[in-house]
Image (spheres, rainbow, N blue to C red):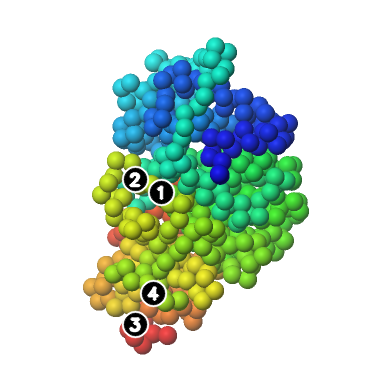
């Protein structure tokens, strides 16, 4: 029988007790130490009355304590809620009012604003981590001491039986497509996702993983971090992303695997030392969360490191499709094939399966798929139909089973009766070496229904204007797909994980369009454009 997350660290400690599990700001944590700390937190939760199905929320930067609490919740049968520390207090209040945690743990830097904004619901015990303790909060040291005392008094306590389908993680979506929803991921879903990660990365106990993505998101938690700990790897854990620290850590810790989303890759590759940095230990860099420009793939491969893509969502834990290192360069730009244990379908608006090469909605089926949305029966019914998760993403499968993601269904632009995929235009724009990133949206147009509008961020020092951008697309994509307006900006609005907020891009375009005359373009019809 497959071990549930409650037993992952204990099983790893039985194999390699003295090996480093975590290397972080709190020092080096061996698997033996991590096991002891998990047990103390487990008993502290029990002393606080936390049992199966109760909620524990965490608001803080990446830390060993955060992972310790996650595994302690797994052993208690409790539900762990990693909160996005980049959100504002009113947003936290809405989420906590919905999930009503028994405990809220917060770094000292976040506890003050939480207290000032009365974020925690009545009845929630609030524990502060670090120096300083606002009124109404309790110190972390006292909480852990209560666990140690309970262990000493009741060393023979047994943890409850845990059903594999019981929820372990409650992760709130980024809110890039509306109000955040609480996604329930079961113990079994994390097991299935870990299996997919091990297969994707050919992960072994010998790997050394660098985590810089925030652990409040499944990308930071589940693409590599938790699967690595299950496997007995060493995880170098950074509190937050810093480009120079990331590059230095790869050499200092002989990192073999890491996840860097495109925005992070751009930041690391902009460093002067990128060209000569020692990357010899890296077996692969994983990436995803948004459209990955092929220029990034080739730039990383040019340093001798495979860049492997993963596609999924919070609702899929998240690994739904992925590349493997030996196929990464050959299929650059694709999101790989269905992950281990996962099935994919491409369907039209009526739910009918589409043949290879045709674009439609991507559906996902597997043990990794969420149980549903927290207190969201109607939203769950819309997203999960006959066990298939309707992703809302548009893509196509080729004859070899590789997935090519075309963007969000609702982002599709219809201009002159022709469908224009924003992702396709964004890829064409980002192939330009003078363009760091791009976002494409539709704007109402009296003649065409919608016009294609692009917002681009130039490479530092590049001499780039709207006319130059449009001229460089000539002959590369059909005329009807080419932007009729281009705006050059310093940065795009993004979610906490680096995804572009298309709603905010549309609002930005509306403001810029009101202040800027439309860029003239030669009249054409979709039917006659090349």
Between marks 3 and 1 in the image, the one whose residue lies nearer the viewer: 1
In the image, is residue 499 above or below residue 215?
A: below
Q: Nearer the viewer, residue 287 or 490?
A: 287
Q: Residue furthest left?
A: 446
In the rendered image, which residue does mark 4 sit on?
A: 354
Residue 302 left/right relative to 165: right
Image disc number at residue 373 = 2
Q: Regarding mark 2 in the picture, which secondary structure is present there?
A: strand
Task: Tell us which disc is closer to us: 3 or 4.
Answer: 4
Q: Residue 415 at what x, y percent from top left? A: 31, 75
* Picture coordinates of residue 187, whole percent (x, y): 48, 41
Q: Marks 2/1: CA distance?
A: 8 Å
Q: Nearer the viewer, residue 156 or 397?
A: 156
Label ID, residue 370: 1
Q: Are marks 3 and 1 in contact (CB under 8 Å)?
A: no
At x 50% / y 67%, what residue is drawn? 403
Residue 524: x and y in percent read 34, 83
Res. 191 mark: none
Seen in the picture, residue 299 relative to 151 is either above or below; the reply is below
Left or right: residue 207 versus residue 507 is right
Which badge, 4 or 2, is on the more N-terminal residue? 4
């Amino acid at each position: 029988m497959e071990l549930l997350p409650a037993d992952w660290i204990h099983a790893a400690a039985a194999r390699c007790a003295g090996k480093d599990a975590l290397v972080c700001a709190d020092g080096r944590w061996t698997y033996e130490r991590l096991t002891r700390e998990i047990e103390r937190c487990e008993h502290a939760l029990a002393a606080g009355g936390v049992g199966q199905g109760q909620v524990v929320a965490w608001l803080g930067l990446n830390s060993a304590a955060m992972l310790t609490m996650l595994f302690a919740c797994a052993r208690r049968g409790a539900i762990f809620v990693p909160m996005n520390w980049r959100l504002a207090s009113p947003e936290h209040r809405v989420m906590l009012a919905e999930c009503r945690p028994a405990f809220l743990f917060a770094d000292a830097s976040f506890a003050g604003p939480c207290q000032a904004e009365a974020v925690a619901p009545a009845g929630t015990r609030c524990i502060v981590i670090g120096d300083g303790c606002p009124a109404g909060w309790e110190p972390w040291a006292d909480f852990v001491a209560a666990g140690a005392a309970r262990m000493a008094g009741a060393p023979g306590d047994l943890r409850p039986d845990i059903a594999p389908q019981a929820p372990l993680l409650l992760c709130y979506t980024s809110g890039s497509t509306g109000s955040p929803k609480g996604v329930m991921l079961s113990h079994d879903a994390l097991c299935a996702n870990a299996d997919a990660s091990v297969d994707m990365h050919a992960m072994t106990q010998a790997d050394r993983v660098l985590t810089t993505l925030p652990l409040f998101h499944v990308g930071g938690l589940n693409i590599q971090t938790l699967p690595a700990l299950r496997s007995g790897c060493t995880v170098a854990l950074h509190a937050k992303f810093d480009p120079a620290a990331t590059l230095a850590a790869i050499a200092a810790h002989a990192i073999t695997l890491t996840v860097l989303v495109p925005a992070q890759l751009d930041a690391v590759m902009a460093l002067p030392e990128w060209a000569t940095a020692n990357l010899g230990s890296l077996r692969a860099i994983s990436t995803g969360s948004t459209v990955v420009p092929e220029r990034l793939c080739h730039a990383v491969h040019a340093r001798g490191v495979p860049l492997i893509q993963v596609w999924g969502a919070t609702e899929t834990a998240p690994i739904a499709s992925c590349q493997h290192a030996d196929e990464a360069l050959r299929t650059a730009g694709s999101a790989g094939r269905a992950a281990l244990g996962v099935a994919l379908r491409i369907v039209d608006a009526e739910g009918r399966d589409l043949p290879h090469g045709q674009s439609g909605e991507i559906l996902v089926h597997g043990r990794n798929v969420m149980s549903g949305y927290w207190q969201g029966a109607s939203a769950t019914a819309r997203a999960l139909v006959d066990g298939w998760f309707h992703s809302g993403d548009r893509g196509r499968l080729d004859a070899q089973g590789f997935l090519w993601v075309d963007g969000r269904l609702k982002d599709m632009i219809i201009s002159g009766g022709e469908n224009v995929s924003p992702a396709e235009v964004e890829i064409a724009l980002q192939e330009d070496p003078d363009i760091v990133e791009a976002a494409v949206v539709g704007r109402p147009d009296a003649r065409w229904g919608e016009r294609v509008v692009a917002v681009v961020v130039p490479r530092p020092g590049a001499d780039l204007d709207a006319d130059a951008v449009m001229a460089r697309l000539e002959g590369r994509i059909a005329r009807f797909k080419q932007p009729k307006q281009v705006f050059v900006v310093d940065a795009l609005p993004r979610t906490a994980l680096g995804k572009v907020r298309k709603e905010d891009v549309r609002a930005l375009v509306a403001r810029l369009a009101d202040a800027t005359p439309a860029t003239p373009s030669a009249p054409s019809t979709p039917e006659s454009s090349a």
